[in-house]
Amino acid sequence: MKAISSIFSGDAIVASATPPGRSALAIIRGSGNGIIKIFQESLAMSVSMLDVDGNRAVVLDINIGDFCDRCIATVFRAPKSYTGEDMVEISVHGSSLIVRTVLDALVSGGARLAMPGEFTMRAVINAKMDLIEAESINAKIAAQTKRALDTASRTIQNAAEIEKVKETAYNILLELVASLEFPEDAPVDDTTMESWQRKIEESYSFVQRFMCKVCDARKLWTGITIVIAGETNAGKSTLFNRIVGTERAIVTPHPGTTRDIIEAVVEIVGIPVTIMDTAGIRESDHPIEAEGIRRAQDVTRTADIVLWVMDGSNPDAKMQCGEKIIPIINKSDIAVSENLRKLYPDALVISALKGDGLEMLLRRIESYMTDIPDDAVMISARIEDVMCKIEDELKIALDAAKKDFWDIVQISLERVHNYFMDIFSQGNDIDMYDEIFSKFCIGK
């Protein structure tokens, strides 16, 4: 374990804060010691940024050899910046070549290219934010749906409540240690111990409720898997194309056309859904088709929802049963066997080719999805793991307090405090920082 101060000196870093490629504008940012001077001299700015007040934007020209460009430059002076250090951000015209030219000049002028997430890591080190807020920023960037974005935004709102639990547990710990080690100087009566027990129970209840919100939110991020399965030539690929909205799967009148799994991601009621088109289930001597059928059976077993498609014109069509299976009778545009209607009265009758019944199918899919409450909260896997440990230790502390085993309460609350230090970055474990911020974008 290395102290942050032993490897981090606030040296000047630069990076593009916008994705690579052609665009109207691109943002290049820098932070650290001497960064304003590096920008000024490396880019031969037409206005002296050294004289510009913090949080001010200036329109100016930059010059690098024969290349020149008009841009907007903004200066942020420590500590009133994102990182807590001196910062500069410039908006240039959005060409990958321009960005590369500017970055090369800045590196030649004394800066270095930033590591992934290094700007935010510096913000945490300089106490501009804690790790919960930092990781929620990355979660916002990674959100694929509006509901996922909302859950990431609620993380910061809940951080204040988590902070209260941390302070409550720590205050009890301080009082408890004083009473156990210095009983004459810090005597404790029954009222005080009852107060400790009540506060521990309230903290434990809050963490329990919080973790339930986290579980509710998980599907918004990991999403669910829907497998389209059934016998050959039932119209599975046509239904897949209809749901996805593009012709991803090849459709022919010949059985066994689909021999491997084809998948696409769509959004349904704010949840990312992976739709899989699979090979038709039948006996086959063809080794490639047989392998496709085996894979289809595997993903069908692990799917969250299975759309079992039957050929409505085939009175002998068969269906698998199960709680997660939605039975579908397809090809209503041709004919639907009355025998199938009687055998499977709950089956949806649709035409994947024409789109008839698709809205009804989507409503049925929605009803199978977990009802995610509006107060669901998304946290990183790291914080979730630590919060689970805190929940376990608070339970141990509560049970021990009820039996007046206060030495055990002390041990559990000490562990709770250490876990909270990990969550809020009140430690010096550089390996933990590297693991967290390596998942961030370069320039963030």
Image (cartoon, grey):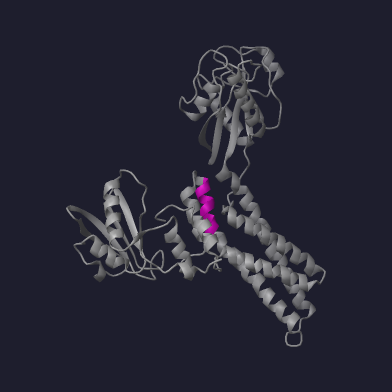
Quarter in which the C terminus is drawn: bottom left
Quarter in which the N terminus is drawn: bottom right
For image coordinates 44% across by 55% down, the residue present is: 116
For residue 150: magenta? yes
For image coordinates 50% across by 24% down, the residue present is: 249
For image coordinates 53% across by 13% down, the residue present is: 253
Q: Front-most of 241 and 301?
A: 301
Position in image of residue 392 (x %, y %): 71, 60
For image coordinates 66% across by 70% down, the residue present is: 169
**Region rendered in magenta:** 147-156
Residue 95 in view (yes/no): no
Residue at the farthest right position = 403
Position in image of residue 371 (x %, y %): 62, 43
Residue at the farthest left position = 66
Q: Main secondary structure of the magenta part?
A: helix
Position in image of residue 277 (x %, y %): 56, 26
- Where is residue 295, by image quadrant? top right
For residue 39: magenta? no
Relative side of 337 to 97, left or right? right
Residue 84 in view (yes/no): yes
Position in image of residue 80 (x %, y %): 38, 69
